[in-house]
């Protein structure tokens, strides 16, 4: 049976050392070659992650600039880029960092050509609904939520309050899985985790006024 799984390719080469409270991506010097190969293999899109550790305006601007510079090239090659500027859940000023990031992303999305499409993969914000405006932009295909080191229960509870975000968890999905499990235990745990994460993506908790 067709699983209807859309393939994505991770294109970044890891994180550079911290500067201005952020970690940019190391230069992706083989991007053109990667995009050519991705197209040959009918890959749908790409993923690239960088990290924001604190609310530094210059750092957040550098993160957004780098993500969008690569995104424009990826988009021009006919693939859909997932931009992943992760705000660390341990950031001492997470809320402020997220507001800086929201503003930086908004300005750069608005500068994209009308036919460009990107996806954003972001830490679940401290302030519910912070990224709703971005999600409503026709150039933003989806706003995905990363679990960022939150436990699965915590990530799902936070995600359920976010009407415009759906889960793209890896760390929270893997919680509870181990090599020691039998196939039956492994699959039962994975099914339960997927069910919980799917529900948090779809069944949203109304915001309390």
Image (cartoon, helix red, strand yellow):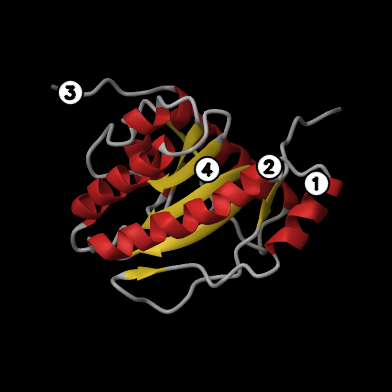
Q: CA distance from mark 3 to mark 2?
A: 39 Å
Say which mark, if any, is on residue 208: 3
Residue placed under numbered mark 1 in the picture: 39
- Mark 3 vs mark 2: in front: 2
Query: How dense is the environment of label 2, judged by Cα within 10 Å: few (below 14), some, or many (20 and up)?
Result: many
Label 3's element? loop
The x and y percentages for residue 14 are: 55, 70
N-terminal-most mark, 1 or 4: 1
Q: Residue at x 50, y 67 (%)?
A: 25
The x and y percentages for residue 175 are: 51, 54
Label 4's element? loop
Residue placed under numbered mark 4 in the picture: 168
Q: Where is 51 relative to 39, above or below?
A: below
Say which mark, if any, is on residue 79: 2
Q: CA distance from mark 1 to mark 4?
A: 23 Å
Label 2's element? loop
Tell me whether circle 4 and circle 3 mark residues in contact (CB < 8 Å).
Answer: no
Q: CA distance from mark 4 to mark 3?
A: 25 Å
Q: Where is 54 relative to 73, above or below?
A: below
N-terminal-most mark, 1 or 2: 1
**Residue 108: quadrant of the picture:** top left
Q: Residue at x 48, y 55 (%)?
A: 67
Residue situated in front as seen by the camera: 99 or 107: 107
Tell me whether circle 3 and circle 2 mark residues in contact (CB < 8 Å).
Answer: no
Tell me whether circle 1 and circle 2 mark residues in contact (CB < 8 Å).
Answer: yes
């Amino acid at each position: 049976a067709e699983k209807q799984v859309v393939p994505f390719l991770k294109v970044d080469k890891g994180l550079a050392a911290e500067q201005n409270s952020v970690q940019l991506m190391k230069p992706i010097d083989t991007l053109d070659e990667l995009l050519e190969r991705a197209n040959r293999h009918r890959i749908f899109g790409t993923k690239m992650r960088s990290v924001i550790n604190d609310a530094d305006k210059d750092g957040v601007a550098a993160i957004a600039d780098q993500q969008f510079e690569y995104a424009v090239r990826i988009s021009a090659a006919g693939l859909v880029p997932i931009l992943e500027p992760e705000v660390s859940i341990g950031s001492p000023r997470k809320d402020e960092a997220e507001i800086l990031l929201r503003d930086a992303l908004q300005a750069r999305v608005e500068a994209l050509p009308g036919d460009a499409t990107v996806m954003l993969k972001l830490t679940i914000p401290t302030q519910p609904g912070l990224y709703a405006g971005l999600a409503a932009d026709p150039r933003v295909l989806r706003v995905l939520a990363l679990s960022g080191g939150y436990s699965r229960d915590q990530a799902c509870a936070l995600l359920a309050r976010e009407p415009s975000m759906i889960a793209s968890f890896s760390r929270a999905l893997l919680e509870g899985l181990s090599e020691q499990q039998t196939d039956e235990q492994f699959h039962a745990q994975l099914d339960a985790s997927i069910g919980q994460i799917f529900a948090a993506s779809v069944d949203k908790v109304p915001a309390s006024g």
